[in-house]
Amino acid sequence: MIKFLVMDVDGTLTDGRIYMGQNGESVKAFNVKDGAGIVLILPKHGIIPVIITARESKILKNRCQELNITEFHQGSKDKLETLNTILSKYGAGLDTVAYAGDDLPDIPCMEAVKKAGGVVVCPSDAIPEIKAIADYISGFKAGDGAIRDCINYLIQKDSSCFKDRIDEVIEWIQAEGYKTGANLPAGCTYSIQEYMTKAEEECILESHRNHIDIQYMIKGNELFKTYTNECLISSGEYNEEKDVEFWNDGIISSQSILVPGSIIIVSNNTPHKGAILFYKEEMVKKVVCKLEV
C-alpha cells in the first residue's frame, strides 16, 4: 500500500529549466494540474507528498507552503539517506513509497524503493537510465502534468490491487460466514446492523478514507445513493478513530435499490447515503464489512 509520494523537483515537478537573475534563481514554473493532484487527490487516499531536492529555492518553499507539503527537504546531499530518515519518523518502509524522479541523483532512491516493493515513476523526458528502472513512464513531460498523470496511475493501481480481496469478502458473505464470524478475510471487520429506513433528508451523507464498504442485505429494502466528490462541503471534522467524515448534500453519482441478497461495494473516499426509505418505512437488516485499504 503506497503511503508516500516522494518527488524530485527540477525535471520532475518543473521542466528542468533554471532561470537565473543577478541575485540568483528568479523563476520556476509549476503545473497547476500537478498541484491539484497533490492537494485534492493524495490526501483522500492517505498518501503523504514528500519533496527531496539537492537544490535550495525560496520559490520552491513558497510553492510547498501553497500545496500544504510539510515533508519538504532541500539541500539534500544524499537523497536515500534523507528518505530513510523521513520514513523512520513514520515507522514506515521503502515498500510504502512511490518515487518520482528524472535524473542520475534519483537512481539510488529509485533502485532501493523498487527492490523493497515500492513503485517508481518518471516523466516522459527522463533520462534512459531512469526509464529503465521505472514501473511507469508518464506520457507527459516534466512540468507538463507528468506528476498528475503519475498520481492517477498510482490511485488506479492501488484500486485494482483490492479486487481479489473484495472477491474474497464477497465469497465469505455468500458462504454465510457472518453467522459465526469464522474465517473472516484478513484486514476485514464486520457488523450486523438493524434499523428503520427513513426519509432521505433525515439520512446522513458520509465517506471513509481508509476502508472499502461491502454491504449485504439480509432483510428489507432501502434506497442507497453515492455522490461525486465535487461541490461537497464538510459538515464536521474527519474522525480518524472511526474513519468517517460527514458531508452536506452534493451531486448524486448513482442510486440503487437494495433488496434481500443485494451486495453493494463502496470505495474509500466515496460519499454515500443509505437507510433511505423505498416507498415506505421498514426494518432493514444488513451485513456491513469494512475492508482496510
Image: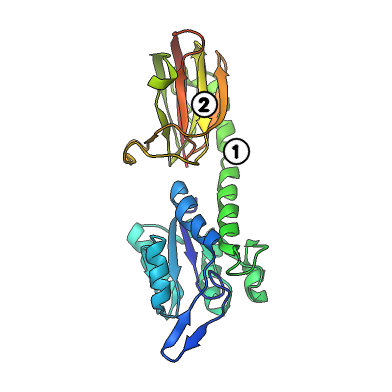
- Quarter of the image holding residue 167? top right
Residue at 50% across, 21% down: 177
Say above or below: 56 vs 48. below
Residue at 44% across, 39% down: 232
| Count of numbered circles on the image | 2
- Quarter of the image holding residue 144? bottom right
Q: Position of residue 65 (x, y in %)?
A: 37, 65
Check contact, mark 2 vs mark 1: CB within 8 A. no
> What distance separates the C-alpha of mark 2 from that of mark 1?
22 Å
- Nearest the eye: 278 or 73: 278
Say above or below: 39 vs 282. below
The nearer-to-camera label among 2 and 1 is 2
- Quarter of the image holding residue 127? bottom right
Which amino acid lies under the numbered mark 2 shown in the image of this protein?
Answer: Lys
Residue at 49% across, 37% down: 270
| Residue 58 in the figure: left or right of residue 214 | left
Q: Which mark is residue 163?
A: 1
| Residue 5 in the figure: left or right of residue 145 | left
Q: Residues within 10 Å of mark 1 (few under 14, many from 20)?
A: few
Mark 2, residue position:
225
Q: Which mark is residue 189?
A: none
Which amino acid lies under the numbered mark 1 shown in the image of this protein?
Answer: Lys
